[in-house]
Image (cartoon, rainbow, N blue to C red):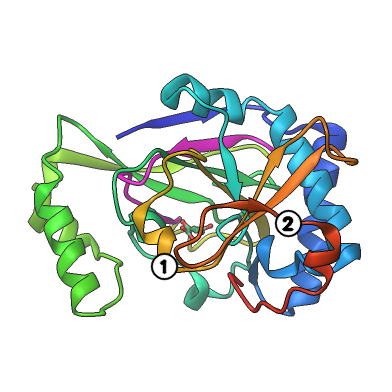
Amino acid sequence: MFFKARPDVFVDAALADLRACADDLLERARRDRTSLGHFLSNATARAKIVSVAHRFYASELPALFAGRHGVTPILNLGYTTIRFQAPEAPETQVGWHLDLNFVGDASPFMVAWVPLEDVGAKRIGLDVCVPTRTLDLDPLLGLWSRRVSERRPQTFSDRDLEDLFGADAYQVRALHMSAGSAAVFDQFVLHRTQLLTAATESRRSFEFRMADPNRLPTSWEQRVGLFCQLDGAAPDGITFLIKRDGEPCRQISDTELDALDISYGA
Ligand SMILES: O=C(O)CCC(=O)C(=O)O
């Protein structure tokens, strides 16, 4: 289990770029959530995605990943998501879950959850399950596997957590975070949309999902994946990559991206 809270990861112009991209893509999606990958074939949206990718690679997040896994990460764009959470929309809140849902195994992976507004008091943020002693995750992983094989939602109730760990083995911590800060964690940290009935304002947030380009999760073999990485040789400094079913990851040009017919990751 890996978890770190980092202040001021994106400030000023970087935060403004993230907000501009979030607003643009949420508007295009006409939904309260979407992903960077979903809009990669659109040249105007792509310019915003490139600016976000640069902000990501200029932040401390890649180094945090490299410090743990020894390599600069690629960003999975289909799984780099943007959410709008209104206080009056409890149905859009996500219950306790693991990002193992995106990964499926213990491959090197990190998510950085980044609110674009201050959260925790007036705006709904993130709750994290913090162990008070070393937690045996096996029962949770067993339940997770059963839910996957039974094709049931891989979310858990408070009761599930109590039954799995015992009520004194963990605390529920609501993260009070300022805009542009990050909660960075791996696929084994239980988290959920904060339960905050007193919320009065909405928030936008990003989830950057990072992986080791040389050790991608096995489950990513069986689907189309879109990624990006920093590339000094590319005209705008960012290369996009595509991975199709069973094939290795390869670079994809803007011309190919323009023609890409993919409804994916929203
Ligand atoms: O932003 C949120 O409220 C939680 C989203 C989340 O944890 C997820 O989609 O994995």
Indicate the position of residue 230 as horizontal and vertical percent values. 72, 35
Instruction: Indicate the secondary structure of the residue bearing disc 1.
Output: helix
Circle 1 crowding by C-alpha within 10 Å: few under 14, some 14–19, many from 20 = few
Q: Residue at x 78, y 41 (%)?
A: 238
Determine which quarter of the picture holds residue 173. Answer: top left
Indicate the position of residue 262 as horizontal and vertical percent values. 66, 77
- Asked if residue 245 is positioned above or below residue 213 in the image, the reply reads below
Question: In the rendered image, which residue does mark 2 sit on?
Answer: 252
Closest to the observer, 95 or 61? 61
User: Image quadrant for the N terminus?
Assistant: top left
Reply yes or no: does residue 184 show up in magenta. yes
Instruction: Indicate the secondary structure of the residue bearing disc 2.
Output: loop
Q: Is residue 89 left or right of residue 59?
A: left
Reply yes or no: does residue 11 show up in magenta. no
Give me the disc on residue 222. 1
The amino acid beneath tag 1 is Gln
Q: Which residues are magenta?
A: 180-193
Q: How many marks?
A: 2
